[in-house]
Image (cartoon, helix red, strand yellow):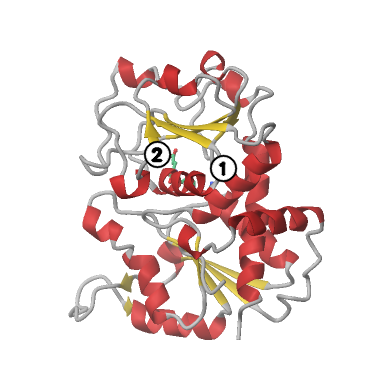
Amino acid sequence: MKKYTGLDDITDLQELIAQARELKNNPYAYEQLGKRKRLVMLFFNSSLRTRLSTEKAASNLGMDVTVMNFNSDAWKLEFEDGTVMDADTSEHIKEAAQVISQYADIIAVRAFPTLTDKAKDESEYVISSFVKYASVPIVNMESATAHPLQALADAITITELAKKKKPKVVLSWAPHPKALPHAVANSFIGMMQKMDVDFTITHPKGYELDKAVVKDSVVEYDQDAALKDADFVYVKNWSNYENYGKVLATTDSHTSWTITDEKLGEARFMHCLPVRRNVIVTDSVLDGKNSVVIEQANNRTYSAQVILKSILENLN
Ligand SMILES: NCCC[C@H](NC(=O)CCC(=O)O)C(=O)O
Ligand SMILES: NC(=O)OP(=O)(O)O
């Protein structure tokens, strides 16, 4: 693998999942592979799981790691070409990416969307500028429109826990007070389209996601109908896509989308975390036997590790 910015960088998903599960059983099997190699992780946004699991994954492979919180610690970056930099940006991505490439063998980047400028977000200007100007492989730790490390961890989790060959997987929208990105939902949808699952998306009318992402996946607006006989219920809020980045007035018809024991039935509850208790999902579901969110977060390590391993094996 030359980079991991999106699911398109995966050539053989089943092989990747199998290797991730082997790494989970034997995490130090490749501890020589990353020796004297450095992962530089750049965060433009907060993180708990991605930061800690990716660092653990890199150290399991023998890599050294540098973490930088870009917004608080680095110079403010300019991404536009030809700008007269007489305002608040101090350094251009052209120099920054080339400089960081001298200190890193792999660069991983987290950069959320603005949720105000759709065209700018969809251009993925942060991560694609790193791809353009860096001379080392780039890993996406959640960009404006995609969270492929999360989606791979989700695929590993579903593969491990599935009790039938073709489980029914439902992606359900749930309410949230803040405007949240589409990235997790987008990558989960893309991943389910690559897997042999019976997949349904459910959300209130008006919360349609990008058609280019949804493609021919089933959308069922009746949440109860969608959840019927589900084996896995993946819950996620996203802000409005058409009315870009807006949280439509929270009506009773939206708060009723909160996942309860009754709605979940015997299905497994999945969420990427962090999760707002009693808004997205009730305490009882999260604390109950069908919640797999902690194991899902555990699989973030092996998702990151199999990607780093695959990139390390392809370094010149
Ligand atoms: N990396 C996992 C999710 C990150 C982000 N969630 C959040 O910002 C939640 C913040 C809050 O609940 O205040 C998202 O939805 O893409
Ligand atoms: N799921 C996830 O990406 O979590 P963090 O935002 O805490 O990294």
Report the residue marked by disc 1: 196
Taking 179 as reference, is 143 above or below it? below
Crowding near the residue tagged with mark 2, few <14, some 14–19, many ≥20 C-alpha atoms within 10 Å:
some
Q: Of the residues under marks 2 and 1, which one precedes in the sequence? A: 1
Most foreground residue, 8 or 120: 8
x%, y% of residue 120? 25, 60
Residue at image x 46%, y 27%?
280
Instruction: Say which element carries label 2.
Output: loop
- In the image, taking residue 70 as reference, residue 33 lies left or right, namely right
For residue 217, the mark is 2
Percent coordinates x, y for residue 215 in the rendering = 35, 45
Front-lying residue, 197 or 312: 197
- Structural distance between the alpha carbons of marks 2 and 1: 13 Å
Give the image quarter of residue 123. bottom left
Q: Contact (CB < 8 A) between labels 2 and 1? A: no
Give SS at disc 1: loop
Image point 55% across, 20% down: which residue? 229
Mark 1 Cα-neighbour bin, 10 Å: few <14, some 14–19, many ≥20? few
Q: Quadrant of residue 172?
A: top left
Q: Is residue 170 above or below residue 139?
A: above
